[in-house]
Image (spheres, grey):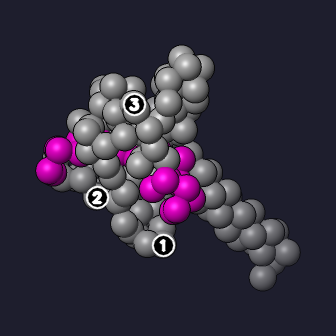
Amino acid sequence: MTIVRDLLKAKSGGTIFHVTAGATVLEAMQLMAQHNIGAVLVMDGETITGILSERDIVRKVDLAGKTSAATLVGDIMTGRVLYIEAGQSLEECMALMTEKRIRHLPVLESGRLLGLISIGDVLREVIHEQKFIISQLEHYIRGG
């Protein structure tokens, strides 16, 4: 059973992209576009103060008739950030993401931020794990 820490180790890069609450939404969007990511953490030093996703931008800026250049991240971010511990299983991670209908989760270990994972990262790893198990079972059935 894969744990979240293993997923982070396998994930390329390891850079945690973040903005401050005082950044404009436009600046956050530029960062997300530049790195092809769907969410950024909002940080105050080492402390997570929120998370901003593409969904937040569409619903809280575009649909509200605001402009991204004039809106601050702190005004539209999700302030109550759920997280997963590095030692938890991918199954627990998927259950949390599904139940709470979220696509991105910070990963913490002893209160320290290790990374940010997406539902795509989790699904990729689960599919990889299942393919390996199927391959092993096929090998066993063939008597090899």
Q: Which residue in the rendered view is the most extreme toward the top?
A: 64
Cα separation, mark 3 vs mark 1, equals 32 Å
- At horizontal 28% and vertical 58% (from top left) the residue drawn is 114
Residue 12: mark? 1
Q: With 131 as the anchor, is 55 left or right in this view? A: left
Residue 114: mark? 2
Callout 3: SS = loop
Disc 2 or 1, which lies upstream in sequence? 1
* Amino acid at the residue labelled 2: Leu
- At horizontal 54% and vertical 17% (from top left) the residue drawn is 64
Disc 3 or 1, which lies upstream in sequence? 1
Quick check: can you spot residue 88? Answer: no
Residue topped by disc 3: 71
Callout 1: SS = loop
Tell me if residue 43 is in the magenta stretch: yes
The picture places residue 101, in percent across and down from the top left corner, at 54, 27
- Residue 64 or 140: which is nearer the viewer? 64
Magenta range is: 30-48
- Residue 59 or 87: which is nearer the viewer? 59
Q: Is residue 8 above or below residue 86?
A: below
Q: Is residue 121 above or below residue 21?
A: below
Q: Which residue in the rendered view is the most extreme toward the right?
A: 142
Callout 2: SS = strand
Q: Is residue 21 above or below residue 133?
A: above
* Amino acid at the residue labelled 3: Thr
Within 10 angstroms of label 2, few (less than 14), some, or many (20 or more) residues?
A: some
